[in-house]
């Protein structure tokens, strides 16, 4: 027979364990967050805000918006999306632009890719991954 105190302790442990399991969905921690939710884009890719881009990418974006001139011959060339990471569209939908990388002698790995619908994507690893660039939130 289990002593009354030990039985009460076991019941308490079971209740606390059960409550801890019910307080969050599977895969979620129990900590609460007060930060704003991550921005979401239309592509389903990870996102970042214009203000979070490296300074050189913001400079390239300003050149794109003003129509150039661009420092690299291939800037504005068709991006074919062979990697199929970006949403699929007909050939010619996307254009790519070099983002200068300080210290690099060639074009480096950083690019902005724009779509005809106004969307902008950033890669810093030569098309291995992309993030959708969202406008800065209104302040």
Image (tube, rainbow, N blue to C red):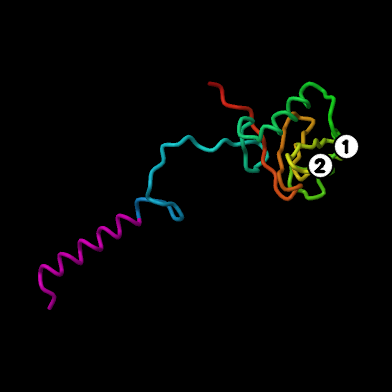
Above or below residue 39? Residue 137 is above
Q: Quadrant of residue 58?
A: top right
Mark 1 or mark 2, which is nearer the start of the sequence?
Answer: 1
Task: Please tell me which residue is depicted at 80% across the width and 30% down the height of the picture.
Answer: 116
Task: Please tell me which residue is depicted at 83% across the width and 35% down the height of the picture.
Answer: 93
4 with respect to 70 (left or right): left
Residue 111's x, y, as percent? 76, 39
Residue 34's x, y, as percent? 41, 37
- Report, in whole angstroms, how far the alpha carbon at label 2 lies from the one at label 1: 10 Å
Secondary element under disc 1, as helix, strand or loop, is: loop
100 with respect to 76 (left or right): left
The segment highlighted magenta reads 1-21
Task: Please tell me which residue is depicted at 73% across the width and 50% down the height of the picture.
Answer: 128
Answer few, some or many: residues within 10 Å of disc 1's Cα (few below 14, many 20 plus, some between 14 and 19): few
Above or below residue 77? Residue 24 is below
Residue that lies at the very extreme toward the right in this rendered image = 73
């Amino acid at each position: 027979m289990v002593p009354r105190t030990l039985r009460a302790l076991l019941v308490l442990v079971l209740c606390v364990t059960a409550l801890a399991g019910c307080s969050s969905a599977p895969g979620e921690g129990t900590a609460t967050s007060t930060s704003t939710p991550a921005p979401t884009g239309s592509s389903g890719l990870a996102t970042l805000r214009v203000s979070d881009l490296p300074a050189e990418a913001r400079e390239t974006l300003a050149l794109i918006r003003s129509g150039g001139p661009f420092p690299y011959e291939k800037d504005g060339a068709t991006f074919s999306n062979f990697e199929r990471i970006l949403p699929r569209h007909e050939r010619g939908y996307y254009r790519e632009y070099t983002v200068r990388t300080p210290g690099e002698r060639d074009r480096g790995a950083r690019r902005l890719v724009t779509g005809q619908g106004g969307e902008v994507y950033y890669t810093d690893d030569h098309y291995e991954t992309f993030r959708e660039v969202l406008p800065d939130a209104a302040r």
